[in-house]
Image: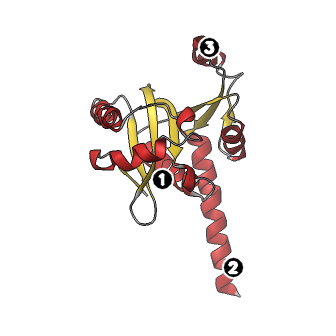
């Protein structure tokens, strides 16, 4: 489902990223295949320096379909950035990728907080974020951070995923799955 970024995936990812429904919401924009290759190389180097964490999202056949990233890592916190090719929207890949990425971030890499900044006009992403039981809208609780994000002219809403809230969700979900399967065994 996820793998470390690889230069071999650049052409396929660039083709997916340039779709008009995807491109406006991509943080690391590239305007050519070569520029995307260069940005990916920079991303790989930045991960080696501990500045970000970036993974390629794969479909069932191992083909690259998007990326998921944690940018601007400071004090065990960072900003989530993810995108999928248009033809993969609405098929459950985003949730699977986030689950795998959050597991790695929280339980393997020591991240404590994941932030999401979502443009006010990106209603689709806001609704998706607000459906998640472990996401907290942080416009009020993190006012100074929100002011920094909105200082450049864009207007964002800020969301936060704390490790403890995510862990509680995972424990509840796994308990429900175990209870359901044991109930089936009794039948």
Closer to the camera in the image, 158 or 151: 151
Q: Secondary structure at mark 3?
A: loop
- Residue at 38% across, 62% down: 62
Q: Nearer the viewer, mark 2 or mark 1?
A: 1
Q: Position of residue 161 (x, y in %)?
A: 59, 37
Q: Residue at x 60, y 59 (%)?
A: 91
Q: Position of residue 2 (x, y in %)?
A: 41, 53
Q: CB atoms at circles 2 and 1 under 8 Å apart?
A: no
Q: Earlier in the sequence, mark 3 or mark 1?
A: 1
Q: How far apart, in angstroms, are the residues tagged by discs 3 and 1?
A: 33 Å
- Disc number for residue 153: 3
Q: Is residue 97 visible?
A: yes
Q: Which residue corresponds to the image point at 69% horizontal and 79% vertical from the top-left? A: 183
User: Label 2's element?
Assistant: helix
Q: Which residue is mark 2?
A: 183
Disc number lying in front (3 or 1): 3
Give residue 58's position: percent from left, percent from top.
43, 56
Q: Residue furthest bottom?
A: 187
The quadrant in which residue 184 appears is bottom right
Query: Label 1 neighbourhood size at 10 Å, few (<14), some (14-19), many (20+)?
Result: few
Are there few (<14), some (14-19), or many (20+) residues within 10 Å of tag 2? few
Q: Quadrant of the N terminus?
A: bottom left
Write down the residue under mark 1. 100
Q: Secondary structure at mark 1?
A: helix
């Amino acid at each position: 489902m996820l793998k470390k970024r690889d230069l071999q995936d650049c052409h396929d990812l660039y083709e997916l990223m340039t779709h008009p429904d995807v491109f406006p919401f991509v943080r690391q924009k590239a305007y050519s295949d070569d520029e995307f290759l260069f940005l990916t190389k920079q991303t790989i180097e930045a991960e080696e320096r501990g500045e970000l964490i970036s993974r390629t999202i794969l479909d069932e056949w191992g083909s690259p379909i998007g990326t998921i990233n944690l940018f601007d890592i400071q004090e065990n916190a960072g900003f989530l950035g993810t995108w999928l090719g248009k033809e993969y929207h609405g098929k459950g890949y985003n949730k699977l990728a986030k689950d795998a990425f959050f597991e790695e971030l929280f339980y393997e890499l020591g991240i404590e907080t994941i932030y999401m900044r979502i443009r006010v006009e990106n209603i689709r992403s806001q609704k998706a974020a607000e459906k998640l039981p472990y996401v907290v809208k942080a416009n009020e609780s993190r006012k100074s951070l929100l002011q920094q994000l909105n200082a450049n002219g864009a207007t964002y809403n800020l969301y936060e995923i704390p490790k403890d809230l995510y862990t509680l969700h995972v424990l509840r979900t796994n308990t429900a799955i175990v209870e359901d399967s044991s109930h089936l065994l009794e039948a």
